[in-house]
Image: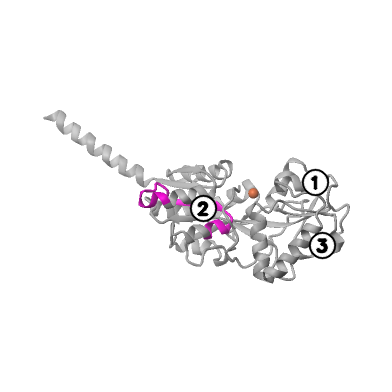
């Protein structure tokens, strides 16, 4: 009799601890590489005791998996780069409103979905990089001007297969219309010094090596390269300061429609938009915090000492899910 009571008590305890464990866990589907997000989740676990489980894959399979899993999904959150991907997840109906006053206070409206389906976490500036040996800063002005005759045989570009140039092109279509944008892109292609590059890092190195004079890259690739080689000669330039500003993309996060732990997930997102996580997030990959109250370190002498002028976020219709960091 006594043994049976003990057995029941043990069963109850097991059930209770199971319930507690479930509530103290958040599951994230992430298209960001592990090294960039693990420190953020580790810091959260250390602070709160909540376990953050995550799996990493490309955006498209993760979104297809969420859609297929439906109500049975173990995932609470979807973490991606490029607002185009988050917009697409929103269109697929696999997200639900974050509904958090904390997130709304931490992140400006232009870095969040207007339907509250996702919030931006960090800003990724795609800007002009140039050789200070062969280009005077005064010769540079806008992305569009790189189509001019003066850049003939001097421009380097990354492939258009990557979502980054697709999103940049989408903002130009939004600004100038498709016809004018095509004219600009043709001008860029005419000015190419060499074949397009597979990645931004190789492009920056080509400028340093004298293969081309000017190009377009995401600033965190410049930051990484500058960290490993402080002698890097190439410099960054913020274009379009007279109109829409530097092209900025977002990494962000959304609450899945059938999240098993919506409250715990919401708390994690709130923390990820706050000072500690924003600093870790931005510093590890040299991105800009989406929370404007979080200060970042100036990176002299790289030229990345001020925040790029953010444009008002509009979902790029042309963006397609692609592998990104
Ligand atoms: Fe990247």
For residue 77: magenta? Answer: yes
Q: Which residue is mark 3?
A: 140
Earlier sequence position, callout 2 versus callout 3: 3
Q: What range of the chain is rendered magenta?
A: 68-87
Q: Which residue is mark 2?
A: 272
Earlier sequence position, callout 3 versus callout 1: 3
Residue occupying the far left of the picture = 1
Check the picture and name the quadrant holding the N terminus: top left
How far is disc 3 from disc 1 in space, using C-alphas?
19 Å
Circle count: 3
- Above or below, 13 against 300 in this view is above
**SS of the residue under disc 3:** loop
Image coordinates of residue 149 in percent, x first then y, are: 85, 63
**Residue at mark 3: C-beta within 8 A of ligand 1:** no
* The one of 38 and 259 positioned closer to us in this rendering: 259
**Residue at mark 2: C-beta within 8 A of ligand 1:** no
How far is disc 2 from disc 3 in space, using C-alphas?
36 Å
**SS of the residue under disc 1:** helix
Q: For residue 239, say whether it is visible.
A: no
Earlier sequence position, callout 1 versus callout 2: 1
């Amino acid at each position: 009799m006594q043994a049976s009571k003990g057995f029941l008590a043990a069963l109850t305890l097991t059930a209770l601890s199971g319930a507690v464990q479930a509530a103290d866990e958040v599951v994230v589907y992430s298209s960001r590489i592990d090294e960039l997000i693990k420190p953020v989740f580790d810091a959260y676990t250390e602070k709160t005791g909540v376990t953050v489980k995550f799996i990493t894959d490309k955006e498209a399979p993760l979104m297809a998996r969420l859609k297929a899993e439906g109500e049975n999904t173990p995932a609470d959150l979807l973490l991606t780069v490029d607002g185009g991907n988050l917009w697409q997840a929103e269109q697929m109906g696999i997200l639900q409103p974050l509904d958090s006053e904390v997130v709304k206070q931490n992140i400006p409206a232009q870095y969040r979905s207007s339907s509250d389906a996702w919030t931006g976490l960090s800003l990724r500036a795609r800007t002009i990089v140039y050789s200070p040996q062969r280009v005077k800063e005064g010769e540079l002005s806008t992305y569009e001007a790189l189509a001019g005759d003066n850049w003939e045989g001097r421009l380097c570009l990354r492939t258009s297969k990557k979502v980054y140039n697709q999103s940049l092109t989408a903002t130009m279509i939004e600004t100038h219309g498709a016809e004018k944008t095509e004219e600009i892109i043709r001008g860029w292609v005419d000015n190419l010094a060499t074949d397009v590059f597979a990645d931004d890092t190789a492009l920056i190195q080509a400028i340093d090596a004298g293969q081309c004079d000017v190009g377009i890259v995401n600033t965190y690739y410049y930051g990484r390269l500058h960290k490993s080689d402080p002698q890097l000669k190439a410099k960054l330039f913020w274009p379009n300061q007279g109109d829409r500003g530097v092209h900025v993309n977002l990494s962000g996060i959304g609450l899945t429609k059938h999240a098993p732990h919506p409250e715990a997930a919401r708390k994690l997102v709130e923390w990820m938009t706050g000072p500690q996580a924003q600093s870790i997030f931005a510093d590890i990959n040299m991105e800009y915090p989406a929370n404007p109250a979080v200060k970042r370190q100036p990176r002299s002498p790289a030229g990345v000492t001020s925040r790029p002028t953010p444009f008002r976020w509009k979902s790029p219709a042309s963006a397609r899910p692609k592998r990104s960091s």
